């Protein structure tokens, strides 16, 4: 095996990581359509909670983490709280949680997505740049390749890095000590994490969908940051269409803000919000066109199912992973969709909701 050296591209990758600053709001007014994804990210950073008080809901998770942190601080060693694996659908606050953890501990968060660490030298470079108690956040950790994953085992367990050099019989392993750090892994697919990796996490925590009351609080905070007014009924309407997900609350708030501006008002009244959601085809459960398309396709093309994920995705022209990670969890939560060993099925409740029976 050839020597593993830190990647030169690390600098570039750290520059790409999410930086914990609040960009100025006015920069958003210069958006171009082709920069929409970038704009979404920018808005997300602007709206990201900065303190535990602003991190609404997820009470069980907050309690567990606070107990872990305070016990570790009493021992004078933050990193002794162990590594943390957060799992659940997108937009529920996994990345935010990692940032808040670094704030509470007073260390830095290094944020990466697993596919950006596809070469061994990438992860080696990242590990060697860590300081004591830093948070290493790896998003989509189920997508780490096997070699990178195995390289992570000694750092996670013993805070050291095994670097190999030479070939065949003359292969030598050099053990480098690393500062104690906390790995926070996030995944939408707990089942795709290998047992050896999973077993190296002290905390394995499920992210819960949010209650309407919590989403109302989040909508009100978002409206304040985005500089428009939401009537109480309007906040409730946004919350109940947010699919239990703060990221969606934020997106709906942006849509409503823009629609209100189009109506020459800074106050989003229930009437304005109703009109906006009718235009955007978001129904009272928060279902959008693609959700309805999934259920209708199952009902009309596959007699209610079961239909395989890939088949279903191809029929509606959507990416299978997006379907699985984004659309299905909420349809299942509402009791409209079932995942069976033979494929996806529309439930009786879905038939009723869409007016088939
Ligand atoms: N508990 C929360 N309280 C308030 N806002 C939240 C909370 N969790 C998430 N958000 C909002 O949702 C956005 C997306 O959260 P994020 O942490 O990126 O989700 P994930 O990493 O699970 O996909 C954040 O930028 C933040 O504005
Ligand atoms: Mg995230």
Image: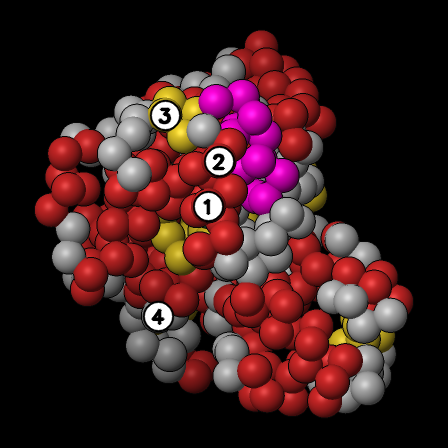
User: Disc 4 or 1, which lies upstream in sequence?
Assistant: 4
Q: Is residue 234 magenta?
A: yes
Which residue is label 4 attached to?
Answer: 119
Residue 167 x %, y %: 37, 81
Mark 3–mark 2 distance (CA, rounded to whole Å):
11 Å
Label 2 crowd (10 A; few <14 / some 14-19 / many >=20): few
- Above or below 221: residue 36: below
- Identity of the residue drawn at 55% across and 66% down: 289
Residue 208 x %, y %: 68, 40
Q: Point out the stretch of residues depicted in magenta.
A: 231-242
Q: Is residue 42 magenta?
A: no
**Quadrant of the frame with the N terminus:** bottom left
- Above or below 160: residue 253: above
User: Disc 4 or 3, which lies upstream in sequence?
Assistant: 4
Relative depth, front residue between 317 and 72? 317
Which residue is label 3 attached to?
Answer: 267
- Identity of the residue drawn at 63% across and 68% down: 292
Q: Mark 4 or 3, which is nearer the eye? A: 3
In what element is the residue under mark 3? strand
Q: Mark 2 or 4, which is nearer the eye? A: 2
Mark 2–mark 4 distance (CA, rounded to whole Å):
53 Å
Q: Residue 271 — which label?
A: 2
Q: Quadrant of residue 217?
A: top right
Which residue is label 1 attached to?
Answer: 275
**Tag 2 near tag 1, CB within 8 Å:** yes
Q: Quadrant of residue 135?
A: top left
**Ligand 1 has an atom within 8 Å of the beta carbon of the residue at disc 1:** no
Mark 4–mark 3 distance (CA, rounded to whole Å):
50 Å
């Amino acid at each position: 095996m050839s020597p593993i050296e830190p990647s030169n591209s690390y600098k570039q990758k750290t520059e790409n990581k999410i930086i914990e600053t609040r960009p100025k709001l006015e920069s958003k007014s210069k958006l171009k359509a082709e920069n929409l994804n970038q704009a979404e990210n920018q808005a997300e950073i602007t709206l990201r909670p900065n303190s535990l008080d602003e991190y609404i809901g997820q009470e069980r998770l907050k309690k567990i983490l606070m107990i872990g942190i305070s016990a570790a601080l009493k021992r004078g060693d933050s990193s002794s709280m162990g590594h943390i694996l957060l799992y659940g659908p997108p937009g529920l606050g996994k990345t935010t949680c990692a940032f808040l953890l670094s704030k509470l501990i007073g260390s830095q968060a290094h944020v990466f997505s697993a596919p950006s660490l596809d070469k061994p030298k990438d992860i080696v470079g990242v590990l060697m740049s860590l300081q004591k108690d830093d948070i290493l956040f790896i998003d989509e950790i189920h997508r780490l390749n096997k070699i990178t994953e195995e390289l992570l085992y000694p750092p996670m367990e013993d805070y050291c890095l095994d670097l190999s050099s030479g070939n065949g019989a003359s292969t030598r392993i050099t053990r480098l000590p690393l500062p104690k750090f906390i790995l926070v892994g996030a995944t939408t697919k707990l089942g795709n994490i290998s047992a050896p990796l999973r077993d190296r996490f002290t905390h394995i925590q499920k992210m819960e969908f949010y209650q309407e009351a919590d989403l109302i609080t989040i909508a009100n905070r978002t409206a304040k940051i985005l500089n428009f007014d939401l009537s109480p009924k309007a906040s409730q309407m946004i919350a109940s269409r947010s699919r239990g997900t703060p990221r969606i609350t934020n997106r709906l708030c942006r849509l409503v803000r823009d629609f209100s501006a189009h109506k020459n008002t800074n106050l989003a009244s229930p009437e304005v919000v109703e009109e906006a959601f009718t235009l955007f085809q978001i129904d009272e459960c928060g279902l959008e066109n693609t959700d309805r398309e999934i259920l209708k396709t199952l009902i009309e093309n596959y007699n209610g199912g079961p239909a395989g994920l890939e088949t279903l995705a191809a029929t509606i022209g959507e990416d299978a992973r997006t379907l699985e990670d984004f659309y299905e969890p909420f349809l299942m939560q509402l009791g409209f969709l079932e995942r069976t060993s033979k494929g996806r099925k529309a439930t009786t409740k879905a038939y009723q909701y869409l007016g088939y029976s």
